[in-house]
Image (spheres, coloured by chain):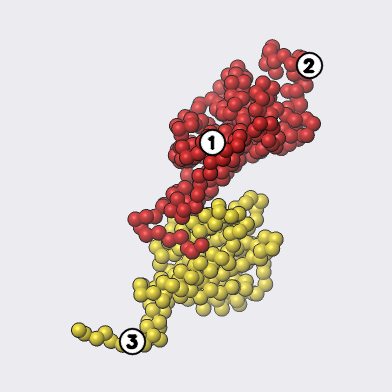
Amino acid sequence: MALPLFDVASDPGPSFASLLAKLNIAVQLPGVTNDPVHATTVVALRCDAGVVLVADRQATAAAIAARDMRKIAEADRHTAIAISGTAAAGMEFIRISQLSFEHYEKMMDETLSLEGKSNYLSSLIQQVNMSTPFTVLPLVAGYDVNHNRGRVFEYDVAGGCYEKDDFGVIGSGTPFAESALRLGYRDNMTLDECIELGALAIYEAGDNDPYTGGPDFVRGIFPIIVTVTANGFVEVDEAATRTIFETINNRRTASKGRAGGDLR
Amino acid sequence: MTMPFYVTPEQQMKDRAEYAQKGIARGRTLIASIYDCGVLFIAENPSASLNKISEIYDRIAFAGVGKYNEFHELRTAGVRWADSTGFSYSREDVDARSLANVYAQYLGASFTDGGKPLEVEILVAQLGIRNKPTKIYHVAFEGTITDEERFAILGGDSETVRSRFLAEGEDVVSLATTLQRAVRALSGPDRTIPVSDLEVARLEDLGSRRTFSRLSDDDVAQLLA
């Protein structure tokens, strides 16, 4: 490819999506006729130090298509993007978002604000969801370095962006995960409390929703837990994640599957 | 109808080269040097926001001297080239040599075309990984591309600075020593450059995908101490 130079009137600016359009590099996914694969439940919680995200690992078509999907990605140092909906569209969406933020940063020599990122994604969702029959819905959560707090943004299929002051949930297991969060969420929770509650919400979704995978002790595959604080995006390591889910699972075994009482 | 004066092709090229060289010589000097863990860039630049050194990709950096608006245009084109190539293929396929070649192609074409020759000199550096070596490519205003051995010097007064930098030693040393040598070479025996007038950046593998980072005035002062 030759050097992409544009004259002043047709310069695409720092937007990566506009650049791809100018260069005629296709972003839209072609129409596919067989069953789309669906990716499933993700929660994001705000806490005093930032945000916590937890996501299951299962992708479902007619049967389970993948048990080890990673649905939370580091969009940049202080931003996490999670996806639900069609897996192919979702993965492409994550790739374009990551590149867009990095591209903006390199072009402008300045990072995009968290609100700037969430607004930019609105039009991207619109573009993806209007151009293919496969919808994708992201959840954006991050630490806003300009305002020193964690923030969570939810979207609708048309690209509407809604900021949540407590928690956000996406995917087919939403009713179950959201119920757990609504009963357990309080103001000023610590990071560890949010990790525990988020894990419990995904456990509930995995337990009730056929399209959400719970902890898989047989294969050693556990939901992904991520924290984003002033120190950036950090994934909780596998041993710690296993312990968190083992604890929930042991309690649930002791209560013979009943989730009542003190909830845990 | 009036006849235009005849100018020989040799004279024409000479005039254009002289014009570009004059423009570049007005600017200050920039040094890029390989050190034991990466590549260091250092430029005398009183502006803290109009940068001469910047990030192109995960392991590639760009530096330019001469007319700011001209090398800035080359820089943004490079970022666009790298990001769209990486998007179409894979991140590993974005390579400094290919980028240096497209720059050379463009600079060469604009030098021979009718328009004003670009008054810039640029560098594309790559931090090595596995099968790719650490490299510094130097592209001159007329498109000549040079694969520099250990370091490259751009801008006005580059010959003097080159001999001073060579006299400092020809071995590959630590970041701090390389920086100290480069600052001495830039400033010369009769003056000192304040830290706030230095723009310093590096390519070094510090554990994340992106390897480019800028050094703040405090970092630089500490390394020079």
State how far apart marks 3 and 2 are (Cα).
96 Å
Q: Amino acid at mark 3?
A: Val
Between B94 and A251, the one lying in front of the other is B94
Task: Report helix, strand or loop for mark 2.
Answer: helix
Vertical relation: A108 (above or below) A254: below
Q: So how many labels did they put on this image?
A: 3
Tell me, yes or no, whether dots 1 and 2 are on the same chain: yes
Foreground mark, 3 or 2, reads 3
Q: Which residue is mark 1?
A: A134
Image point 46% across, 60% down: which residue? Answer: A4
Place residue A34 in its image quadrant: top right
How many residues crowd around disc 2 within 10 Å: few (fewer than 14), some, or many (20 or more)?
A: few
Q: Amino acid at mark 1?
A: Phe
Q: Chain of mark 3?
A: B
Position of residue B87 measured from the top left corner of the image (x, y, whole percent): 55, 52
How many residues crowd around disc 3 within 10 Å: few (fewer than 14), some, or many (20 or more)?
A: few
Vertical relation: A100 (above or below) B3: above
Write down the colour of chain A: red
Q: Is residue B72 left or right of residue B55?
A: left
Image point 47% across, 40% down: which residue? Answer: A131
The yellow-coloured chain is labelled: B
Position of residue B27 measured from the top left corner of the image (x, y, whole percent): 43, 70
Q: Amino acid at mark 2?
A: Ala
In the rendered image, the quadrant that contains the C terminus of chain A is top right
Vertical relation: B80 (above or below) B146: above
Position of residue B132 measured from the top left corner of the image (x, y, whole percent): 66, 64
Q: Point out which mark residue A254 bears.
A: 2
Q: Which residue is mark 3?
A: B7
Q: Chain of mark 1?
A: A
State how far apart marks 1 and 2 are (Cα).
42 Å
